[in-house]
Image (cartoon, rainbow, N blue to C red):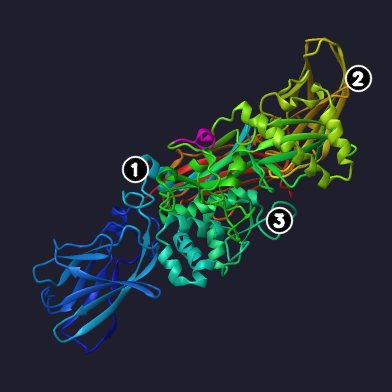
């Protein structure tokens, strides 16, 4: 910003040519360093509430006389304003109100420095600043400029206070993050540029608050409420999705994305916020959970609220609010799309750090905020802020949306095997939902495990009693989906032997099955798995094994099977049998790509007793790896040309035809750099060099992907974290 603002004469009783305010210096450089706001804006002074910032006033004509020339500042916000008398040094002031103190810069008082301090819970907004001067005979007013006031996590009395410097660096100042996706057994790490230091991002975040329904319906009440981080997070959560308002992102989870950007193509928040702000608030197409969460994290960090993106693996979407998820399988192991409930392989939301003045102190700290539009909260698509401590303690009456978020991390899963409209077997799983919850570690790219923060250990007694209480509801739920005879289903279920109950009511099954995937499947390699069958009875068993594999979206039920097998087996009493299966690359080449998720299920049927047992696993396919490096190292200077090199070696058993190598990096490259490959033989290596130049300091991401031409199928990917310093 321009430090020196020419004082604009606003109004006055009489023209006073002998004494005027000529220039106001906002001392932006010094204030930004003092307030930890460097780089947030080149247009406005940006300061934090509860901490003094300074201005220098330069007068024209006679010197300023502090005894006869009264100075009064006014911080204006719409219809609200705070009038701030400028006091002598050492005079008492009320910390609950705005204050200002003057310090002469020269003996003749031609210039004076004013220290201004806002209350610790002031409204977060863009303020107008006016200077009023009253002399013996005259009154003059000047509109001297604008400044932005943010939350202050460095200040103990601020509700967002965070005491440790390392946490402040990670959760406020860092513009670089990692998102964890894929499956629990094969975590895919995706970089994200939060971009809070990119030009225009702060202004877009302030615009988001101004465009909210709360502000448009009652701006006076909205401004008064904006001092509370709980209120701010509710507003921002709703505004990042566009379902109810002029929000930032439109969500889409299936179909064509040709009229927008595919969610997986985004790599940072700045592009999204710029596009929204420059298009008269038209929603940006398209987002999914990680995009919604990452944009919220950017906005919250910009506004001064410590935030981090959190991934819940196997996150439950409990549509009927009974904290139980029902899944349905055929008797041959194919998963069916019969339930309104679902389990997402991964789901991302945000945690924001704040004191909960609306609750007791035990609920201070991290709060879950989920902007992905799933269910309404108080009439709008938003979720939270919900204290993580309330989820962990199962305090379901605590604000906001605790039951939904509790189910997301700790619901029970009931898997029912159905045949001809009847339930012929079932298993209950009280462990898999929320089995891994993580976020980026401080000063590290490794994931930090947050499970203990969200979940207390369930006892077997609690799980068993929950199972018995809910079973009738599950069967009735199934009746609503199927036209089969539910009375027969209940009869078959309740009169079945202890082995058919598969553990119901605390009984041990006589037949057990488990399914394991070997290692982390890599695109182009054979997928290997094993099924372990245990016979706990005193009789030999004649069994049929059904194994089924289906491609699935991370947030939905699987598609039709692309691979299946069946096999008759015999097992002796008290024996364990291991069965091995493989899916070769030619069998899935046309079906699966890098990062795709597969559901595999096995059903073992006893031919004599008709007992059926089920085991299921989901895994993701890892893309191949590209090598990305910068000549001279990955720490570079702003506005200097550097060369980046991307290398790919074809390690597939067959040649690669018609692929596209794409290199991109916001703040490093203008647009995307592409190289089209006609043919790449097995073992052959391709290399692409691109010239990069950083336009702003901070952490930037250089990303490379290799995909099939005219297709979203990813063959290989990589990213490089680039540290940019001022030239």
- Report the Cα–Cα distance between label 1 and label 2: 66 Å
In this rendering, would 150 be left or right of 643? Answer: left
- Residue at image point 46% right, 35% down: 444
Q: Measured along the vertical axis of the image, is residue 370 above or below residue 1?
A: above
Measured from the top left, where is residue 671 in percent x and y? 58, 55
Q: Nearer the viewer, residue 218 or 490?
A: 490
- Residue at image point 60% right, 39% down: 409
The span shown in magenta is 444-455
**Circle 1 SS class:** loop
- Report the Cα–Cα distance between label 2 and label 3: 51 Å
- Report the Cα–Cα distance between label 1 and label 3: 44 Å
Mark earlier in primary sequence (2, 3): 3
Furthest-bottom residue in this view: 14
Measured from the top left, where is residue 383 in percent x and y? 57, 52
Measured from the top left, where is residue 479 in percent x and y? 83, 44
**Circle 2 SS class:** loop
- Which circle marks residue 257 in the picture? 3
Q: Nearer the viewer, residue 321 or 435?
A: 321
- Which circle marks residue 608 in the picture? 2
- Which circle marks residue 163 in the picture? 1
Of circles 2 and 3, the one toward us is 2
Q: Nearer the viewer, residue 548 or 404?
A: 404
Q: On the rendered image, what quadrant is the N terminus found in?
A: bottom left
Q: Measured along the vertical axis of the image, is residue 21 above or below residue 415?
A: below
Measured from the top left, where is residue 318 in percent x and y? 67, 45
């Amino acid at each position: 910003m321009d430090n020196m603002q020419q004082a604009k004469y606003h109004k006055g009783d009489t023209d006073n040519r002998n004494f005027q305010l000529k220039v106001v210096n906002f001392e932006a450089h010094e204030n930004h360093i003092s307030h930890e706001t460097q780089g947030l804006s080149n247009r406005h002074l940006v300061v934090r509430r509860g901490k003094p910032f300074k201005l220098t006033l330069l007068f024209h004509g006679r010197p300023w006389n502090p005894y006869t020339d009264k100075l009064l500042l006014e911080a204006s916000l719409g219809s609200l304003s705070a009038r701030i008398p400028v006091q002598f040094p050492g005079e008492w002031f009320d910390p609950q109100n705005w204050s200002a103190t003057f310090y002469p810069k020269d003996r003749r008082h031609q210039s004076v420095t004013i220290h201004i301090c806002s209350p610790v819970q002031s409204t977060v907004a863009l303020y107008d600043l006016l200077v009023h001067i009253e002399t013996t005979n005259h009154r003059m007013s000047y509109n001297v400029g604008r400044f932005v006031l943010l939350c202050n996590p460095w200040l103990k009395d601020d509700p967002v206070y965070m005491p440790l410097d390392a946490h402040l660096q990670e959760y406020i100042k860092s513009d670089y993050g990692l998102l964890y996706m894929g499956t629990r057994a094969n975590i895919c790490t995706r970089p994200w540029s939060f971009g809070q230091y990119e030009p225009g991002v702060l202004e877009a975040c302030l615009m988001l608050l101004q465009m909210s329904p709360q502000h448009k319906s009652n701006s006076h009440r909205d401004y008064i409420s904006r001092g509370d981080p709980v209120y701010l997070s509710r507003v921002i959560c709703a505004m990042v999705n566009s379902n109810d308002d002029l929000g930032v992102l439109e969500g889409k989870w299936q179909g064509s994305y040709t009229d927008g950007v595919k969610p997986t193509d985004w790599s940072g928040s700045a592009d999204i916020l710029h596009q929204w702000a420059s298009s008269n608030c038209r929603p940006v197409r398209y987002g999914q959970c990680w995009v919604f969460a990452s944009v919220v994290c950017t906005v919250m960090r910009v506004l001064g609220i410590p935030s981090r993106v959190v991934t819940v693996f196997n996150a439950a979407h409990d549509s009927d609010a009974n904290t139980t998820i029902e899944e349905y399988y055929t008797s041959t192991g194919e998963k069916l799309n019969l339930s309104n409930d679902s389990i997402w392989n991964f789901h991302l939301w945000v945690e924001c750090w704040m004191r909960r003045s609306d609750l007791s102190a035990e609920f201070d700290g991290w709060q879950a905020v989920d902007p992905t539009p799933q269910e309404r909260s108080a009439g709008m698509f938003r979720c939270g802020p919900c204290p993580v401590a309330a989820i962990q303690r199962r305090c379901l009456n605590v604000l906001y949306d605790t039951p939904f978020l509790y189910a997301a991390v700790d619901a029970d899963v009931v898997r029912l095997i159905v045949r001809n409209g009847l339930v012929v077997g079932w298993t209950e799983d009280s462990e898999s939902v929320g089995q891994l919850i993580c976020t980026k570690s401080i000063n590290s790219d490794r994931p930090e495990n947050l499970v203990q923060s969200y979940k207390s250990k369930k006892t077997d007694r609690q799980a068993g009693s929950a199972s018995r209480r809910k079973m009738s509801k599950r069967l009735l739920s199934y009746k609503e989906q199927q036209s089969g005879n539910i009375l027969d289903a209940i009869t078959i279920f309740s009169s079945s032997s202890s082995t058919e109950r598969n553990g119901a009511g605390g009984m041990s099954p006589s037949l057990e099955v488990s399914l394991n995937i070997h290692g982390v499947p890599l695109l182009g390699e054979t997928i290997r798995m094993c099924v372990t069958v245990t016979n706990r009875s005193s009789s030999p068993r004649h069994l049929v094994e059904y194994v089924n594999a289906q491609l699935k979206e991370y947030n939905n039920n699987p598609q039709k099977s692309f691979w299946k097998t069946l096999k008759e087996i015999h097992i002796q009493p008290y024996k364990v049998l291991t069965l091995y299966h493989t899916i070769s690359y030619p069998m899935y080449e046309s079906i699966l790509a890098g990062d795709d998720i597969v559901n595999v299920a096995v059903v073992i049927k006893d031919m004599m007793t008709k007992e059926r047992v089920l085991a299921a696993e989901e895994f993701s396919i890892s893309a191949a790896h590209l090598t990305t490096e910068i000549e001279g190292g990955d720490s570079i200077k702003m506005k200097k040309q550097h060369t980046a090199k991307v290398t790919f070696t074809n390690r597939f058993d067959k040649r690669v035809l018609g692929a596209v190598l794409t290199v991109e990096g916001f703040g490093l490259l203008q647009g995307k750099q592409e190289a089209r490959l006609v043919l790449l033989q097995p073992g052959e290596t391709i290399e692409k060099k691109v010239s990069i130049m950083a336009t702003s300091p901070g952490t930037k991401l250089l990303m490379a992907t290799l995909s099939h031409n005219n297709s979203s199928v990813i063959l290989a990917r990589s990213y490089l974290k680039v540290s940019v310093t001022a030239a």
